[in-house]
Image: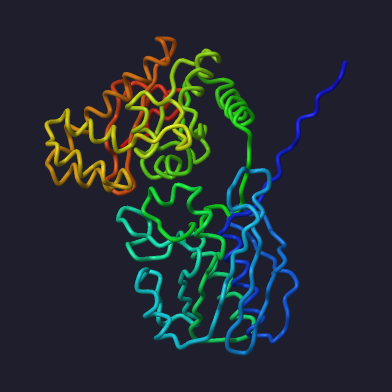
Amino acid sequence: MEETKKKRLRSGYTTGSCAAAAAQAAVHMMLSGKDVPEVRLDTPKGITLFLEPADSVWNSEEASCAIQKDAGDDPDVTNGVFVYAHVRKCGKEEAVKRMHFFPDEADPDADVVVAIEGAEGVGKVTLPGLEQPVGAPAINRVPRQMITEEIKRICAQFDYHGGIVVTVSIPAGEKLAAQTFNPRLGIMGGISVLGTSGIVEPMSERALIETIGVEMRQKGYDRQYLLITPGNYGTDYLKGHFPFPDDEAVKCSNYVGQTIDMAVEQELSGILFVAHIGKFIKVAGGIMNTHSKDADARMEILASCALRAGGSAKTARSILDCVTTDEGLRVIREAGLFEPSMKIMTEKIDDYLKHRARGMLKTGAVIFSNVFGELGRTQDVPELLEALKKERGMEECSVL
């Protein structure tokens, strides 16, 4: 019998890791006066990268270099792009002033104050509702933290005290941005510097669904009820609002429908989703694969909920003009339609989850927003929570 070998997909690293590694190398060259042939970067994922700087230029006051992104086997349009970091010395006061987009990250009393800016090919935020304010470079929080930590570490080695201005640029970024969702999100002029783990972990769709099924079988080996979250937002919300252990939930990614199907196949009694509205608003429209490449009707569904709650056409148009669900929720709240709109949304989510389960298991969902907190619970959530607690011997634990 011919044996078929499955190819193991190769991981890569994010634009955030590239920017942090480039900044580290540039500061090291500026302060040491020597070339840096290789950079060691410890990512938030716990994986250590050894990266080779390119196009290095330095003197005692400033330096720049680039790191080429490798997305591994992930189909990422930014694969192969060069991410540059230019660094220069400055006074702490100047660095603090340059951090006006992120004032909470400015500490004038620190030994080193790091100001991070964007230049060519790094997108600029033009609409409200994203992590960064309007006008700021599209450099996400974790990459900013990585850049800052790497620079401070190198500065400590060379006993440098003062300010450092880091300018991130991606020469090919503006051209590549047209192939991403950035223009739709109001990020103009380039791509985003992203990454929460520093690592790109590619998986084929079939392999990912199989992995979800394996995790469901493992965690459901001697149980009948499972907690499910689409990803890190749901996991973080669980930690702060429910008494279950950190590793309790199965991550289903975008595959809501397939997860229900697998739960039925495994003859489970019930599953409870804890999900951010950004994903699960789509389920209120019957969309069971929530990946943006397959469907993005978030604002349309949110607007329809507001209309059904008695909202005006003007309110609906305002929601449709929003970039994020949190921004849309703010419009709904200002229109005085928050509770009825969320009730309608939750009821529709409940209907579609039950329809997919075909009466073969109980389904429920707790929907939340990072800005507005819990938004709604479907009909069977109280029963599912009690069953989850009882099965885990947690009857005395309270549930918020």
- The outermost residue toward the top is 359
Image quadrant holding the N terminus, namely top right
106 vs 226: above or below: below
Q: Along the horizontal axis of the image, is 21 left or right of 250?
A: right
Depth check: give the residue in front, 388 or 17: 17
Depth check: give the residue in front, 4 or 382: 4
The residue located at (72%, 62%) in the rendering is 50
Q: Which quadrant would residue 58 be assigned to in this image?
A: bottom right
Depth check: give the residue in front, 102 or 166: 166
Q: Which quadrant would residue 115 be assigned to in this image?
A: bottom left
Q: Along the horizontal axis of the image, is 98 left or right of 13?
A: left
Could you say where residue 15 lies in the image, as x and y percent from the top left? 57, 58
Colour scheme of the rendered structure: rainbow
Could you say where residue 360 lies in the image, as x and y percent from the top left? 44, 10
The residue located at (67%, 54%) in the rendering is 70
Image quadrant holding the C terminus, namely top left
The residue located at (39%, 80%) in the rendering is 96
The image shows a total of numbered marks equal to: 0
- The outermost residue toward the right is 1
318 vs 362: above or below: below
Could you say where residue 342 lies in the image, as x and y percent from the top left? 23, 33
Could you say where residue 377 lies in the image, as x and y percent from the top left? 29, 29
